[in-house]
Amino acid sequence: MGCLVLHKKTVSFIALFLLLLVISSNYVLYHSSFGLQSLPADLNGVVVGSILDLSLLAPLLFLAWQRKFSLKHFIVLMATGLIAARFIIPSEYLASFQTVMWLGVGIEGVLILFELSLLFMLVKNVPPILRRIKSSSLPLLFSFSRAVNEKFPNQTFLHILCSEMLMFYYAFGTWKKQPSNEGNTFTLYKRSSFITFQIMIIHAIVIETLGLHWLLHNTSMTLSIVLLILNIYSIVFFIGDIQALRLNPLRADDDHLYISFGLAKRMEIPFRDIAEIVEDAHILEQKIPSTTIEFIARDFETVHPDLLLTLKSPIEATLFMGIKKKYKQVAIRVDDPHAFKKIVKERLEKAQRDELI
């Protein structure tokens, strides 16, 4: 099993490396003096190769990197690759391929219209979703996701959109809110410098944004604007992530454990589905396998979980951008490990007694 996991990681890494190589080599080919000097007199063959690279090879490599193969995603990525080709390949070289280029625009247009219809459905259902959230006693990260899942269980686009809505809400709409200090809640970050580290990253992004924008705005305005948008998005994400981490401590109710780590990941664990609580220091200090999700605030020091929950069967966790993935074990590090272990053991014993009745 370990060799299989390692093999999958290796394939994923190779796919990512090749994806970046395909995109960067095609960009250098048309936007560097070395690349332009290498172009032959008859450019049609080279342009066709670049179009195939960006519309077929790059999507396949992206799906191999993500290890998720579906026809729908491939079509979306193919159309995206054709649109990317319009920006990477100079327009004078694309004169003979306008029909193919417009095919990508057409596919993206149809998908955008479909997604706009989904967005209209979401807006239409906002009032009942808000009522569902207000009537729930769960933390917002969980109540909001649950309300959206009930209305739109299989709409990936809407789940991604709602994930982005949460990011903007926590970044801009939570500054007057205070975290819960109930007895069944536990913070995850105070034993580390994780938030300080996040703030340092924000400062670094701001400095990088100013420097790169100044360097690139005269040479490549498009690239400068794209990097500016990405950096602004990153800053908003880190601010929202800090706020989500502060305002959503781990919560142990009678039947469920609600645990999240900022906007990056969250998980709802019924106590009846916990098979074992591992506290052995030797096991906890070993390398965490890929089948384990960790809720650990990491900074510059090496830290280990306070306990490891082994589940009876894999449970789904929600990751960044609403991505779903199942895990067999959960590694947790909290700021009050003794009280946390006590309450988890009590809840687990209660769940086990209830199963026997």
Image: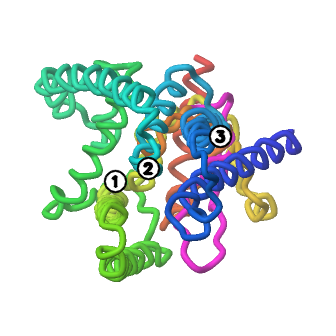
Which residue corresponds to mark 1?
A: 248
Measuring 15% from the left and 56% from the top, which residue is drawn there?
Answer: 173
Q: Amino acid at mark 1?
A: Asn
**Real-space CA distance between mark 2 and mark 3, rounded to the nearest whole angstrom:** 31 Å
**Label 3 neighbour load within 10 Å: few <14, some 14-19, many 20+:** many
Measuring 35% from the left and 82% from the top, which residue is drawn there?
Answer: 211
Q: Residue 274, image x and y in percent?
A: 63, 35
Which residue corresponds to mark 2?
A: 260
**Label 1 neighbour load within 10 Å: few <14, some 14-19, many 20+:** many
Left or right: where 177 falls relative to 311: left
- Magenta segment boundaries in residue numbering: 292-315
Q: Residue 226, image x and y in percent?
A: 34, 60
Which residue corresponds to mark 3?
A: 61
Quarter of the figure that contains the N terminus: top right
Residue 252 appears in view: no
Sequence order check, earlier mark of 1 and 2: 1
**Real-space CA distance between mark 3 and mark 1, rounded to the nearest whole angstrom:** 36 Å
Tell whether position 303 is magenta.
yes
Q: Amino acid at mark 3?
A: Leu
Measuring 25% from the left and 44% from the top, which residue is drawn there?
Answer: 165
Q: Amino acid at mark 2?
A: Ser
| Picture disc at residue 55 | none
Question: Is 154 in front, or is 220?
Answer: 220
Left or right: where 202 falls relative to 100: left
Q: Is residue 132 above or below residue 199?
A: above
Q: Is residue 204 above or below residue 271?
A: below
Q: Secondary structure at mark 2?
A: strand
